[in-house]
Amino acid sequence: MGIIMFAVFGLIVGLIARALMPGRQSMGLLMTAVLGMVGSFVGGFLVSLVTHNRVADLNTAGVIGSIIGALVVLFVVGRFGRKSATV
């Protein structure tokens, strides 16, 4: 049950990050969930550096850190990811 909740949380965080990031991100729901899960790990790690919380703790700073982490991952993927030919 924990994995399913983490995937749903990742999807929600990914959707919020995609809504906040300007521009068009062409990815499906699965990649949005993966974006949110990776961003959750990145944000949790960054929050754990600043606070005394563990990476896996669910708290307000962790949720905000997850969204910020997903935004960072989305920026890096958009900047250095696959280049598509647009005409």
Image (cartoon, rainbow, N blue to C red):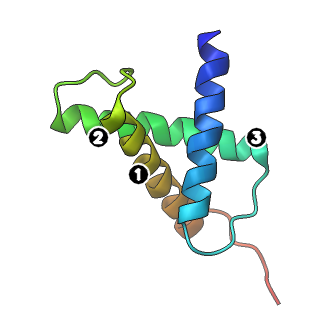
Q: Specify the label residue 30 is tagged with.
A: 3
Tell me the SS state at disc 2: helix
User: For this rendering, which residue is in front, 78 or 2?
Assistant: 2
Q: Specify the label residue 46 is tagged with.
A: 2
Q: Specify the label residue 68 is tagged with.
A: 1
Position of 52 compared to 32: left or right?
Answer: left
Instruction: Please name the residue shown 46% across and 47% down the image.
Output: 67
Instruction: Please name the residue shown 71% across and 45% down the image.
Output: 31
What's the CA distance linking mark 2 and mark 1?
A: 9 Å
What's the CA distance linking mark 2 and mark 3?
A: 24 Å
Q: Amino acid at mark 3?
A: Leu
Quarter of the figure that contains the N terminus: top right
Label whose residue precedes the other's in the sequence (2 or 1): 2
Instruction: Please name the residue shown 58% across and 24% down the image.
Output: 6
Number of other residues with Cα within 10 Å of mark 2, as a class: few under 14, some 14 to 19, many 20 or more: some
Tell me the SS state at disc 1: helix
Residue 24 coordinates in the image, percent (x, y)? 69, 72
